[in-house]
Image (cartoon, rainbow, N blue to C red):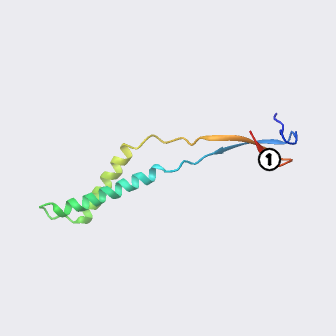
């Protein structure tokens, strides 16, 4: 059992806190899908066979989503850190 280095109390609680990481993978998957949707719509306009840009955009979004999920990194674990909280004096320490 730890004691507080400030007031030497034994009423100490261990706190484990997870850190959130900036830049989640969902945003990059969405942006790649939107990019592919734009490319698909542009390509459908330039094809000799009349295809609606809407269909080209939907096809591009599907392809972009599939490629994004295939090449996405493994899920990142959020690191955590711990500290102690003194219930008597209200200070945090390690």
Element marked by disc 1: loop
Say above or below: 45 vs 76.
below
User: Which residue is pictured at 84% across the width and 42% down the height?
Assistant: 6
* Most distant residue in the top direction: 1
**x, y (%) of residue 80?**
63, 41
**Going by the image, does 35 lie left or right of 26?**
left
User: Which residue is pictured at 23% across the width and 61% down the height?
Assistant: 42
The residue that mark 1 highlights is 91
- The image quarter containing residue 4 is top right
* Most distant residue in the front direction: 6
The quarter of the rendered structure image containing the N terminus is top right
Using the image as rendered, state which of residue 10 and residue 4 is in the foreground: 4
The quarter of the rendered structure image containing the C terminus is top right
**x, y (%) of residue 13?**
78, 42
**x, y (%) of residue 16?**
69, 42
User: Which residue is pictured at 54% across the width and 47% down the height?
Assistant: 21
Q: How many marks?
A: 1
Q: Residues within 10 Å of mark 1 (few under 14, many from 20)?
A: some
**x, y (%) of residue 60?**
28, 56
**Going by the image, does 89 lie left or right of 45?**
right
**Going by the image, does 89 lie left or right of 69?**
right
User: Which residue is pictured at 30% across the width and 52% down the height?
Assistant: 63
Say above or below: 26 vs 1.
below
């Amino acid at each position: 059992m730890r004691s507080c280095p400030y007031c030497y109390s034994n009423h100490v609680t261990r706190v484990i806190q997870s850190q959130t990481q900036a830049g989640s993978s969902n945003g990059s998957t969405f942006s790649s899908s939107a990019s592919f949707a734009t490319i698909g719509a542009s390509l459908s306009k330039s094809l000799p066979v009349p295809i609606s840009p809407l269909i080209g955009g939907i096809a591009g979004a599907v392809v972009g989503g599939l490629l994004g999920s295939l090449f996405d990194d493994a899920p990142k674990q959020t690191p955590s850190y711990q500290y102690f909280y003194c219930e008597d004096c209200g200070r945090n320490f390690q």
